[in-house]
Amino acid sequence: MDSVRAVLIDIDGVLTVSWQPLPGTVDALHEIRDSGLAVALLTNTTSRTRASIAGTLSAAGFPVAAEDILTAPAVTAAYLADRLPGARCSLLNSGDIREDLTGVRFVDDADAVPDAVILGGAGPEFDYPVLNRAFGHLQRGARLVAMHRNLYWRTDQGLQLDSGAFLLGLEKAAHTEAVVTGKPSPAFFEAALAHLGVGADQALMIGDDIESDVLAAQRAGITGALVRTGKYLPETHRAASGAPDHVLDSFADLPALLR
């Protein structure tokens, strides 16, 4: 832990559940900030903009500003600008995140044929007509860009299905493979390290998703810590493709590990 200069933190399931702070997490983040460590919040959340997320967390007592947050939509916008400049995009997402998709050219006409289908977080919008229309676009050659592959997440109502389940179906049916821009994409972690100005060997990633948060970070050379909150399930832990560097009961235990 002596080499750690920055902490990368997942939000949902680590700091909060349904945007309510988990016990001890506010004080723990204050302690980490006070220790002088750099902090970035990495989230696949696609239902809110960076400004909205920062406002909610700040109101709950977390020492967080919008510039501390790196979202899958923001990384998606950078990917599209670099790899598919000027592409006409159809967005399927629950929540308005266009503010963070800077420079993306959207196709809102249901009859228009896009160059890319962008998949965000799941919600009521993911009904049969919409998914079938996306399937049609992919059959006609549109690229598939997914902000994440999360199969589910935890809310105050329990585990809820996420867009990764629909993504698998679209890939299989359309005989295509999505480009994933959020976690576990290496580019997401690289963007966070560049934002903080640290190397992979100087950072620690803490999350509740063993594959997308922790093991993906470890493959990028970052130390990984898994928390037993949020979407954590013992059976998922046992069946994982690797072992976390550290396992904690909650984010509240992180300051003690760093000490």
Image: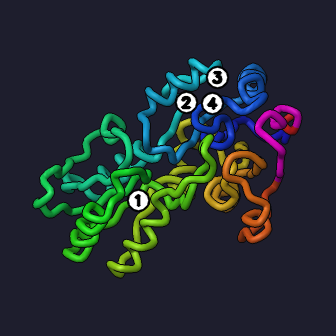
With 181 as the anchor, is 29 left or right in this view? right
Q: Is mark 1 on a helix, strand or loop?
A: strand
Q: Choose mark 4 or mark 3, whichever is in front.
A: 4
Of the residues shown, which amino acid type is indicated by label 2? Asp
Residue at the spot x=51%, y=47% of the render?
44
> Where's the N terminus, which quadrant?
top right
Specify the segment rendered in magenta. Answer: 246-256
Q: Mark 3 points at which residue?
A: 62
Q: Name the residue under label 1.
A: 146
**Could you give the CA–CA distance between mark 4 and mark 3, rounded to whole angstroms?**
11 Å
Instruction: For the residues labelled 1 and 3, say whether their Cβ atoms are less than 8 Å apart.
Output: no
Q: Is mark 3 on a helix, strand or loop?
A: loop
Residue at the spot x=64%, y=32% of the render?
39
Q: Position of residue 103 (x, y in %)?
A: 25, 41
Q: Name the residue under label 4.
A: 20
**Could you give the CA–CA distance between mark 1 and mark 3, rounded to whole angstroms?**
29 Å
Say which mark, if any, is on residue 68: 2
**Could you give the CA–CA distance between mark 2 and mark 4, rounded to whole angstroms?**
19 Å
Label 3 environment density (alpha carbons within 10 Å; few <14, some 14–19, many ≥20): some
Q: Position of residue 22 (x, y in %)?
A: 71, 33
> Where's the C terminus, which quadrant?
top right
Of the residues shown, which amino acid type is indicated by label 4? Gln
